[in-house]
Image: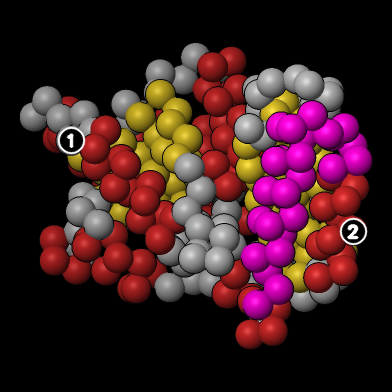
């Protein structure tokens, strides 16, 4: 099926495989960019990077029910496929795979992909089952499309680490590429969930990035990580955030707690502003 200006829209796995087979026969390499839609400039950056890495780009849009908890925003998550399809066309994407829930999870579906360790920290304890949902759906998307490369944003840094872990562990033949976070002019990380912010909350939102950047700078100058992140947490709450799930300094590779003076750190944050749960992270140094 064709979307705007020739974007091929595919809704079932068989159609996706037919498309991929045709590109393979023509010797084309393939990049996959999984998304849940409600596309913003961060996603477009993923598509443009994908274009530079492969001959054909497939974007996926699937609001994956299994990665949302019972009290989370699955129902409210913004859905705008027509607008997204136009954005993908402009970004030079070749195909959009937009399956239905029953195509992804047919009756009798009973398998979960679970990653130990990396999912026990940061968002893991606050969103039970979330990373299993992500790992399961991304495994399926990778095996359905069998791309050469797949691209994910660094804003969801823990998700990226989990995806790198299970693709290596399960010998899925794909290269996972992380793409740096795209930010608004005031520093707020681009996110589909920014749409939940009122005008007043939107003015406060960049404080999260400001606070973790300050903590990261202090740590790189030798501050005790625990003290720096505790100061960041106070600053975020003072700015008007409703609650903070965590602000922590951890190692980028293993996500273990960062020790004073240790290299390769990152400051990670998740906090509620109104009904929006915002996450962000910045490198130390
Ligand atoms: O980052 C997202 O949008 C989702 O978690 C993903 C990777 C598309 C899986 O549903």
The answer to whether residue 51 is left or right of residue 128 is: left
Q: Name the residue under label 1.
A: 55
Q: In which quadrant is the N terminus drawn?
A: bottom left
- Residue 250 appears at what percent x and percent y? 76, 31
- Farthest residue toward the left? 26
Outermost front residue: 221
Query: What residue is drawn where x is 45% and y is 28%?
Result: 176
Q: Look at the image and say whether residue 209 sits in the magenta stretch.
A: yes
Q: Which of 197 and 285 is in front in this view?
A: 285
Q: Which residue is drawn at 40% across and 61% down?
A: 41
Q: Which secondary structure class fits the magenta region best?
A: helix
| Location of residue 146 by image quarter | top left
163 vs 172: above or below = below
Residue 72: percent from left, percent from top: 75, 63
- Picture residue at 63% right of the left edge, 36% below the top: 283
Number of labels in the image equals 2
**Label 2 crowding class (10 Å Cα cut-off): few <14, some 14-19, many 20+?**
few
Q: Does the magenta stretch include residue 5?
A: no
Q: Nearer the viewer, residue 226 or 46?
A: 226
Q: Position of residue 133 (x, y in %)?
A: 65, 43
Give the residue at mark 2.
234
Q: Quadrant of the C terminus?
A: top right
Residue at figure coordinates x 83%, y 34% from the top left: 223
């Amino acid at each position: 099926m064709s979307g705007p200006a020739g974007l091929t829209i595919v809704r079932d796995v068989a159609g996706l495989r037919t498309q991929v087979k045709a590109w393979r026969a023509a010797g084309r390499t393939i990049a996959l960019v999984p998304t849940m839609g409600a596309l913003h400039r961060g996603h477009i950056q993923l598509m443009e990077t994908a274009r530079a890495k492969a001959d054909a780009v497939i974007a996926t849009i699937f609001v994956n029910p299994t990665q949302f908890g019972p009290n989370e925003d699955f129902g409210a998550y913004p859905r705008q496929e027509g607008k997204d399809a136009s954005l993908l066309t402009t970004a030079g994407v070749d195909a959009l795979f937009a399956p239905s829930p029953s195509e992804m999870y047919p009756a009798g579906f009973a398998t979960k992909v679970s990653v130990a360790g990396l999912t026990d920290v940061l968002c893991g304890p606050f969103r039970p089952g979330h990373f299993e949902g992500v790992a399961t759906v991304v495994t399926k998307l990778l095996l359905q499309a069998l791309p050469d490369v797949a691209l994910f944003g660094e804003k969801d840094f823990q998700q990226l680490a989990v995806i790198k872990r299970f693709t290596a562990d399960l010998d899925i033949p794909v290269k996972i590429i992380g793409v740096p976070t795209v930010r608004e002019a005031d520093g707020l990380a681009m996110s589909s969930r920014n749409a939940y912010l009122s005008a007043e909350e939107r003015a406060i939102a960049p404080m999260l990035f400001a606070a973790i950047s300050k903590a990261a700078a202090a740590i790189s100058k030798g501050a005790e990580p625990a003290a720096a992140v505790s100061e960041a947490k106070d600053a975020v709450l003072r700015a008007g955030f409703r609650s903070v799930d965590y602000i922590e300094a951890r190692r980028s590779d293993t996500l273990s707690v960062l020790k004073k003076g240790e290299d390769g750190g990152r400051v990670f944050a998740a906090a509620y502003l109104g009904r929006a749960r915002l996450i962000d992270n910045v490198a130390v140094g």
